[in-house]
Image (spheres, rainbow, N blue to C red):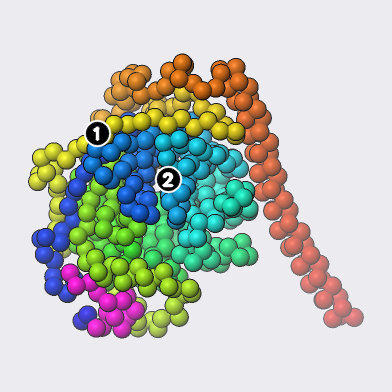
């Protein structure tokens, strides 16, 4: 059976699969991180795996050290919910997206210097670096994807074809493609060379909350609002696997670097690990109280982290086959082009996987086994003051006024814990020690007001330019159609004459 899997193109199965599941190889919860005051929206490991960045509804980014008792840094700069965070491939930059319509680039150290990008005209939902770190893709509720040059820190171009909010956009491993998902119930593949949509997957049941490429760039996985996880082969435009393992909307997925496993986060309060070689569910992890909004493997695959409505960040150890994972990572890094299109008989498995009544899965509830792993490292506030923006802590929103706003952003609001309700959070925010006082400001208030006014005017200009750009694109498309029609008419007339 193992040799058959190799022939089908999935690569050698891990030794743990060949031996069968053993208890010492089960994932284990290592640590809790507590510091955010509201739901966690995004997590990402640094390339070295020594740091973890998190984004939250409390408008802050936090940078955690995986080393016990090390200080955590809280970055203050965004003025609304931070929706996405990601390290650059070299680990020297940290990108974040926010509902304040901006994207920020941070230097992930105690100084916390940052620069601000403004081109979107609506909340920004995701950020993603290309594998070489030269480009950044951002997805927004203004129905567009924008690509930025990181060397010059300039806007390059926009991708317009979605007809509703764009929830996520990700580069392929080789940077030649971008995949995006939208509430218009489509998943689109874009060619970064000609800036055109080259493929389109549609789902009439629900929309995808999150989408990403597998490590070798041949497949994409989508996290569905209809409780499903789907894996598509972009070489033959076929649905390969269809999992129905959650009882709530799936908010995020993350591929293990080997490409053999996929972990999912859902509003049903659980994480699930899927074995893509066997096409089945192998683990159900219960550690959060309420919806889980985000999950991510570390770059080496030995760790993964999750966050959700309970404002907790959980750090897990996978205990998968390390040697096999390293081999697969090296193999994927050497890949410079897509594999040849497989024969239909080589696609495995070829049928949906509802997993109803399966008894092989293992449920892990760390709260039943771990007495106290919760740690609260000392938190240092890092304020961002730069040439392009200022931060007035009196205007920083610590939470949306209504829990319905959180439910509108994610799914299944009934699972939100009482710890994340507005009343409880307002009580927590009364602790003024979490915010810098007026005497701690490094910029006078009058100068801050003047800079704020200038930024408001620049924001208006940026939005105007973005709208004009969109209209120009539409005009160019119409003009192209007119010229094509004129050419057809000319050819018909010439043919008749």
Q: Residue 472 in the image: x percent, y percent? A: 72, 50
Outermost residue, right direction?
497
Marks 2 and 1 in Cβ contact (< 8 Å): no
Q: Quadrant of the C terminus?
A: bottom right
The crowd level at tag 2 (other Cα within 10 Å; few <14, some 14-19, many 20+) is: many
In the figure, is residue 111 to the left or right of 159? left
Which secondary structure, mark 1?
A: loop
Of the pair 455 and 414, the residue shown nearer to us:
455
Residue hosting label 2: 85
Q: Quadrant of the N terminus?
A: bottom left
Residue 439 in the image: state x and y as whole percent.
46, 16
In the image, is residue 19 above or below residue 158? below
Q: Neighbour class for label 1 at 10 Å: few (<14), some, many (≥20)?
A: some
Look at 55% across and 62% down and name the residue there: 190
Residue 454 in the magenta stretch? The answer is no
Segment colored magenta:
3-16
Per the model, the C-alpha gap separating discs 2 and 1 is: 21 Å
First of labels 2, 1 by sequence position:
2
Numbered mark located on residue 99 in the image? none
* Disc 2 element: strand
Question: Residue 203 vs residue 283: left or right?
Answer: right
Q: Residue at x 18, y 56 (%)?
A: 27
Q: Position of residue 180 (x, y in %)?
A: 49, 56
Which residue occupies the foreground of this view, 357 or 147? 147
Q: With 33 as the anchor, is 403 left or right in this view?
A: right
Vertical side of 334 occupied by 385: above or below? above
Point 35% across, 82% down: residue: 346
- Residue beneath the point at 45% across and 35% down: 111
Q: Mark number for residue 376?
A: 1
């Amino acid at each position: 059976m193992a040799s058959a899997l190799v022939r089908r193109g999935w690569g050698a199965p891990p030794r743990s699969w060949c031996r069968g599941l053993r208890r010492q190889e089960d994932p284990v919860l290592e640590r809790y991180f507590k510091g955010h005051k509201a739901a966690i929206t995004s997590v990402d490991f640094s390339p070295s795996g020594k740091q973890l960045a998190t984004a939250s509804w409390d408008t802050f980014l936090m940078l955690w050290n995986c080393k016990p008792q090390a200080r955590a840094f809280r970055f203050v700069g965004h003025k609304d919910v931070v929706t996405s965070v990601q390290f650059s491939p070299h680990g020297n930059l940290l990108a974040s997206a926010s509902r304040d319509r901006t994207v920020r680039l941070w230097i992930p150290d105690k100084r916390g210097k940052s620069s601000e990008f403004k081109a979107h005209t609506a909340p920004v939902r995701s950020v993603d670096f290309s594998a070489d770190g030269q480009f950044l893709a951002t997805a927004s509720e203004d129905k567009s994807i924008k690509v930025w040059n990181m060397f010059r820190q300039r806007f390059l171009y926009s991708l317009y074809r979605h007809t509703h909010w764009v929830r996520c956009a990700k580069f392929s491993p080789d940077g030649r493609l971008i995949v995006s998902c939208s509430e218009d119930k489509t998943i689109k593949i874009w060619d970064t060379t000609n800036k055109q949509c080259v493929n389109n997957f549609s789902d009439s049941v629900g929309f995808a909350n999150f989408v990403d490429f597998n490590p070798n760039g041949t497949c994409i996985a989508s996290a569905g609002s209809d409780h499903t996880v789907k894996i598509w082969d972009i070489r033959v435009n076929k649905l390969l696997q269809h999992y129905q393992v959650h009882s709530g909307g799936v908010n995020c997925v993350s591929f293990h670097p080997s490409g053999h496993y996929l972990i999912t986060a859902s509003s049903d309060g659980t994480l699930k690990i899927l074995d893509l070689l066997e096409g089945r569910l192998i683990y159900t992890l219960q550690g959060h109280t309420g919806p889980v909004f985000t999950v991510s493997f570390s770059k080496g695959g030995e760790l993964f982290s999750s966050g959700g409505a309970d404002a907790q960040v959980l750090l897990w150890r996978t205990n998968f086959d390390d040697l096999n994972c390293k081999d697969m990572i090296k193999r994927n890094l050497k890949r410079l082009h897509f594999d040849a299109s497989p024969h239909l008989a080589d696609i495995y498995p070829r049928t949906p996987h509802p997993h109803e009544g399966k008894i092989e899965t293992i449920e892990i509830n760390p709260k039943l086994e771990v007495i106290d792993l919760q740690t609260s490292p000392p938190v240092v506030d890092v304020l961002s003051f730069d040439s392009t923006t200022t931060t007035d802590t009196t205007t920083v929103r610590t939470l949306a006024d209504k829990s319905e706003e959180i439910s509108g952003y994610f799914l299944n609001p009934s699972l939100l814990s009482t710890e994340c309700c507005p009343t409880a959070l307002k009580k927590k925010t009364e602790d003024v020690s979490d915010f810098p006082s007026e005497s701690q400001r490094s910029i006078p208030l009058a100068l801050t007001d003047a800079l704020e006014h200038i930024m408001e005017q620049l924001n208006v200009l940026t939005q105007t330019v973005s709208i004009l750009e969109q209209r120009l694109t539409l005009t160019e498309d119409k003009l192209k159609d007119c010229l094509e029609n004129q050419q057809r008419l000319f050819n018909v007339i010439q043919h008749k004459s």
